[in-house]
Image (tube, rainbow, N blue to C red):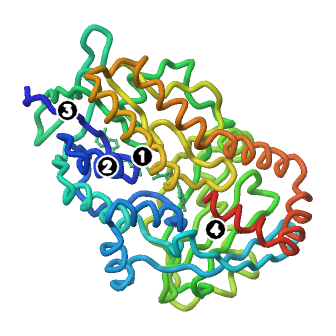
Amino acid sequence: MESKHEIIIVGAGPAGATTAIILAQQGHDVLLIDRRQFPRDKACGDAVPAVAIELMWRLGMKEKINQAVQRGEFYPLDGMLLMSPKGYRLEADFKKGTEGGDSYVAPRFYFDAVIQQHAVDSGAQFLQADVKEPIMENGRVAGVRARVNGSIKDFPAKLVIGADGVTSAITRALRPKNNRHVDKHRAIALRAYAENFDEFPHQVEFYFYNEILPGYAWIFPTGDNQANIGLGMRLDRFRGNHGKGRLQKMLDDFLAMPEIKERLLPGFRLRDVAVWQLNFGSQKRLQHVYDGAILVGDAAGFINPLTGGGIHNAMVSADLAAQTAHDALAKEDTSRQTLQIYEKLVHDAMWSGMRRSYSLQRWLLNFPFLIDIMIKQMKANSRLAQIFLTKL
Ligand SMILES: Cc1cc2nc3c(=O)[nH]c(=O)nc-3n(C[C@H](O)[C@H](O)[C@H](O)COP(=O)(O)OP(=O)(O)OC[C@H]3O[C@@H](n4cnc5c(N)ncnc54)[C@H](O)[C@@H]3O)c2cc1C
């Protein structure tokens, strides 16, 4: 048994590391646990919107971000291309964030390491360990049980934050089976890095076509003829129409489309192909707090159902969880009743946007011609295009 920590955060991705930064900066004793050492890869499109960058600036990461940009690890964006099923194209400029921040394609190998390092620099203690389950005492979470260097150890804490992503051991243990994401609020996606590909510099590309709806294929450049390429679709439709093992075939079909095929340069290859799940924030009545525990980021399920973007929402939920944790610890009361304010805060911050995105996604699925109309509309109104981008 290890000595008791005030807060244990399981998972050092954007959600967990951001929570750790805020709580450590407030002077709390934080143990941040991840089963991987950093830097590490995570299957993602790597598109980071300016709002997330500006949140990082506010937490003191401006210098670290500038250095990552100078090293070529964060690739700045200035535009996007949307392609409709009938082949209508919309090109729109990216606006900077309200504080002048850029959006980037920032491979998670680099991006997550910046935030995790900042958590450590802010005073959080980092431990590489594989968390197996929360420790339960009298019906409440009292810490975590984890495998460290081959042996199982108990780590007691006043409060546990579950930030261990979509396959969260904390969520699995705490959320009853009848309170979990159903397939129509989930997606499956494949990501690969392409080398020797004629990317459009500084421009992200989204392709909507009939076989992939509701979903899209993307090309997100990282410079020097390299790009993050992938595709994803809603899980119920994927299971119904395709079945396991078909994502790679869908990617091959996408790359064989004439307008994409002509951009494969000599020596083209895909590396680091990975498949992962996404849980949308559009499902009603999911519980995010328990006696002694709060779920944040993908562990709770806050991905936008239209765009598949989850990094910014993970950080927003981290911010709200840190506020909630700080207040609850001051009162020495980490009961579900006290922590429940977090559910209200995330609802107020995200719910209306999630529902709007989900209805739009359903409309587009049932009436794909609407995408053609919408892309024509966006041409006339680039504000719509900006809204799409901020939901990434
Ligand atoms: C293919 C794909 C493409 C995407 N593209 C985008 C995009 O372009 N832009 C965007 O904004 N979002 C995108 N998303 C969503 C985005 O990746 C997530 O929303 C985001 O990673 C959530 O961050 P998180 O910190 O909650 O979880 P994660 O980033 O998953 O971090 C969880 C951490 O927990 C650790 N962990 C897991 N289990 C344990 C355990 N048992 N013990 C200890 N540690 C553990 C993991 O090692 C990991 O470091 C995409 C998702 C997918 C799958």
Task: Tell which circle, 2 or 3, labels the residue nearer the N-terminal end.
Answer: 3
Q: Is residue 224 left or right of residue 234?
A: left
User: In front of the other: label 4 or label 1?
Assistant: 1
Q: Nearer the viewer, residue 117 or 364?
A: 117
Q: Nearer the viewer, mark 4 or mark 3?
A: 3
Q: Position of residue 292 (x, y in %)?
A: 32, 22
The Cα–Cα distance between marks 1 and 3, rounded to whole angstroms, is 18 Å
Q: Amino acid at mark 4?
A: Trp
Q: CA distance from mark 4 to mark 2?
A: 33 Å
Q: Element under label 2?
A: helix
The one nearer the camera, 205 or 318, is 318
CB within 8 Å, label 1 to label 3: no
Tell me the crowding category of disc 4: few under 14, some 14 to 19, or many 20 or more residues within 10 angstroms, Cα based.
many
Residues packed near mark 1 inside 10 Å, few (<14), some (14 to 19) or many (20 plus): many
Kindly tell me whether mark 3's CB lies below 8 Å from ligand 1. no
Q: Are marks 4 and 1 in contact (CB under 8 Å)?
A: no
| Contact, mark 1 vs mark 2 (Cβ under 8 Å) | yes
The amino acid type, in three-letter code, at marker 1 is Asp
44 shown above or below 341: below
Which residue position is annotated with label 1? 319
Tell me how far mark 2 sits from mark 3, CA to CA. 14 Å
User: Where's the N terminus, which quadrant?
Assistant: top left
Can you tell which mark lies on residue 218?
Answer: 4
Q: Position of residue 67 (x, y in %)?
A: 31, 80
